Image (spheres, coloured by chain):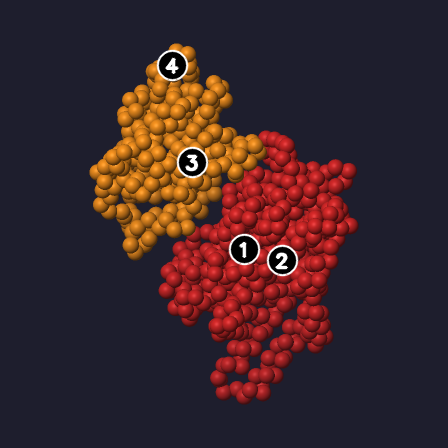
Amino acid sequence: MAEKFDAIVIGAGPSGNAAALVMARAGMKVLQLERGEYPGSKNVQGAILYAEALEQIIPNCRRQAPLERPIIEQRMWVLDDESYVGSNYRGTKKKDEPPTRYTVIRANIDRWMSKKATDAGVLLICEATVLDLIKLDGKVVGVRTDRLGGDILAEVVVLADGVNSLIATKAGLRPTIKAADVALAVKEMHFLPKEVIEQRFNIANDEGVVIELFGKITKGMMGTGFLYTNRESIALGIGCMADDFKKGGVTPYDLLDAMKAHPAIKPLIAGSEVKEYAAHLIPEGGYKAIPQVHGDGWVIVGDSGGFVNAVHREGSNLAMTSGRLAAETILKLKEEGKPFTAQHLARYRAALEDSFVMKDLKKYRNMPEIFHANPQFFTTYPELLNRAAATILKVDGIDKKTKEKEIAGEFVKRRSRLGLLGDAIKLVRSFR
Amino acid sequence: MHIVVCIKQVPDSAQIRVHPVTNTIMRQGVPTIINPYDLFSLEEALRLRDQLGGKVTVITMGPKMAIEALKKCISYGADDAILLTDKVFAGSDTLATSFALASTIAKIGETTPVDMVFCGKQTIDGDTAQVGPGIARRLHMQQLTYVAQVEKVDLDKGEIVVHRRSEGGVQVLATKLPCLVTMLEGSNVMRYGSMDDLFRAARYEVAEWDHKAAGITVTAQCGLKGSPTVVKKVFAPPARAVKAEMIKTEGKTPREVADALLTSVFAKHPKLEMEIGQ
């Protein structure tokens, strides 16, 4: 071991790739370590890519990236056991305004982005696992890998090692992630011919649909389900907070199976071939669960920093943006000839606070707690909402006023007047 | 000692699907891997090199993307890699492939004489096990197939002793170098390369040879022209019409479950019960 690098990036997901690419493009000598066989091989996501965040790093990305379908329609379903109440938004394609959200397949997009990084000069080493950080007088000066002769030194280490961030935890840079702060999500890839997907979802070949699912499908646990249309497959998944799973005794695959059997979902995936089954943790603790993101000789980016906006299901954009901001901070310090101390790297934190990343997370800082403690939002209300719809739409000779009374009575019976008021306040608090 | 290892980049057969309508193999999106059988040969070659000195050169014939497979071999510790890539090789069957690879090995031998050639037992996509023996025949090398263990290589005497697995048992064979060996699966475990080798692989520039570089002047034996094998039809075997039967039982202990199973089998095959009963 003799070689020294300007920077080492641990992990080749969106945040690590963004950081490595931005630094290498500016001429830094960057080593990137990925424990998977190739970038994207171990990564799991729904997945939706937010093009604007990528555009900031790779201009003209929409033309080159392996994207599946731009999302033209968003459906939001609140599910009861066998029914749902939903809302749709369908936009139109605008010539001068490209779409901002695309469905993607992570194995493809991560590989593509990584190629951009290696083209820019990043030395990428796959199948090497970082076991620990090397510290000297409290400062991180390198990494220790599981390979023979695998100690490598660098001026600064960027931790993009994912949701568990085992390395940062082991090095004592952050506490162990709590079950209350992560969701466990499972998903399946259902393959169907292109034409069948387009017919079922009423879309053209360059259009995609997203369905967000909320309600009784999570059996009272804090979580949501999703259905995304890819070119020739449908990604279908559901996730709930890990501690809820622990308490409830329901298994993730039972949840997924029940969701697939729901009368509203079943016909959408009928006749498909399941080719992939995956599970992953998602950091959904929000603003309050974000650890220290910088220190002497190190910064944390992406999922390892907990940068996921669970409410809007945004993650890859926060990951890429945090990677870019970290890299830009490092570049600026290097240019100014300043060492990578905690004091100087604090600029990264400031840059995050100044961006949508922290602003959005801050906005929803109360939501995880509130939703976690109030399962009625996932059970009682979806049920009441569905019943209300059924009652009001049923034409059975009963007048509408009586029906409204019946519905209101049902709400009061289930939640009490005070309870309803309390829930309304909680809902408002969680969104601001 | 100079060892040449022939490898092939193959689609990961565990992930291949057959198109339900056209019956063609859907290669799109299927990840490629180094033919797993080749890795046993590569590891054996690396061990011999570590033991006796010299170098290991890995070669493959294929499209440019096969560079990835060769770089992976470097990361395991191989010294050099050559990609044989040329349009004239397109459509090669095992005959044409063994011709192209044998020519390449002969050419490599002009600079550094080749003592041994290692091949995988067979590939997981073609399953013919013909290319290794084809190379040995063309290069007039002794061939040792299904080798479970290389017992001894004596460079001074130019001798090799191996254990070869056969139907009836194990043959201990001795022969002269140069020779060609195909290793049996499970005969060793691929090493976990060092960080130095990973670095070397990441920066390694694989040499690309066309037919001229491989010393081939007449291309009649190459590619489709040199391939008498014709694939007439590819099809997926039809799904079996017979459905598995679920035997229901209230039994809880293994004995009760086994009883239920036997009762059900005997009910359908009374003759069997009589035979066993006697």
In this view of the protein, which residue sits in the foreground, A232 or A275?
A: A232
| Closer mark to the observer between disc 2 and disc 3 | 3
Q: Along the horizontal axis of the image, is A66 left or right of B184? A: right
Q: Chain of mark 3?
A: B
In this view of the protein, which residue sits in the foreground, A395 or B104?
A: B104
Q: What element does badge 2 sit on?
A: helix
* Residue kind at label 3, given as amino acid type: Ala
Marks 3/4 in contact by CB < 8 Å: the verdict is no
Task: Judge the density around disc 3: few (<14), some (14-19), many (≥20) Cα neighbours within 10 Å.
Answer: few
* Residue kind at label 4, given as amino acid type: Gly
Circle 4 residue: B158
Q: Which chain is red?
A: A
Q: CA distance from mark 2 to mark 3?
A: 39 Å
Task: Judge the density around disc 2: few (<14), some (14-19), many (≥20) Cα neighbours within 10 Å.
Answer: many
Residue B239 visible somewhere in the drawing: no
Marks 1/3 in contact by CB < 8 Å: the verdict is no
Residue at point 60%, 56% (across, down): A320
Q: CA distance from mark 2 to mark 1?
A: 17 Å
